Image (tube, rainbow, N blue to C red):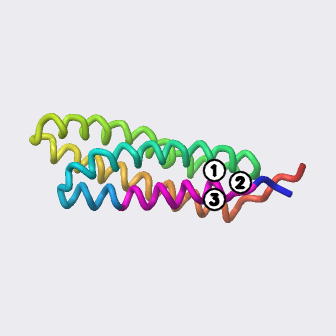
Amino acid sequence: MPPSTIPFWVTFVTTVLLLVVSLVTGWTRKRRAHLWLGPLTMVSLVVTVKLTEELVSRYDFPPDDLAFHLKFAKAGGYLALPVILTGVWLWKKPKARLWHQIAVYVWLAAVLTATGTGLWMFGLGTLKTA
């Protein structure tokens, strides 16, 4: 019997929920909540990515489709850095708000695309046999 996928799905759903709540607290300028939800979302995303890597190792995927997905997944990972940096900048200086918003929108586009292509890719994958 293959290892459970439950830890992956729990962290995936947790990350999505944290992302939504973090976005809402950012848009509504509920700063106190956003200052801990934003970083918590990023930590949850890292845990989800690690569990995704474990899950992917148990499947075979068409190489071209995997390469296509990985472009967006890597972009989402790298684009988290400007979100974090502009978030710290905004925490210190309110004039950084526009830059932080732009960084969030670009990162969100990459993450949503990575999520969509990741789910699509899993539909094409086959579980490896022992």
Residue 121: image tag: 3
Which numbered marker is on residue 66?
A: 1
Spatial CA distance of label 2 from label 3 is: 8 Å
Tell me what residue is drawn at x 73 percent, y 45 percent.
57
Tell me the crowding category of disc 3: few under 14, some 14 to 19, or many 20 or more residues within 10 angstroms, Cα based: some
Q: Which residue is mark 2?
A: 62
Seen at 60% across and 63% down, the residue is: 120
> Which type of secondary structure does the marked residue at label 1 adopt?
helix
Residue 12 is inside the magenta segment: yes
Q: Amino acid at mark 3?
A: Met
Tell whether label 3 touches label 1 (CB within 8 Å).
Answer: yes
SS of the residue at dot 3? helix
Tell me if label 2 and label 3 are in contact, CB under 8 Å: no
In the displayed structure image, the side of residue 45 where residue 6 appears, left or right: right
Q: Residue at the right extreme? A: 130
Q: Is residue 99 located in the magenta-colored stretch of the structure?
A: no
Camera-nearest residue between 48 and 70: 48
Q: Residue furthest left?
A: 95
Image point (17%, 55%), residue name: 29
Q: Quadrant of the N terminus?
A: bottom right
Q: Amino acid at mark 1?
A: Leu
Q: Is residue 27 left or right of residue 78?
A: left
Residue found 72% across the figure and 59% down from its top? 125
Q: Quadrant of residue 78?
A: top left
* Image x and y of residue 7, in percent: 64, 54
Precedes in sequence: disc 1 or disc 3: 1
Of residue 44 and residue 75, the one placed in the foreground of this image is 44
Q: Nearer the viewer, mark 2 or mark 3?
A: 3
Which residue is the extreme one toward the front? 32
- The magenta stretch spans which residues? 4-20
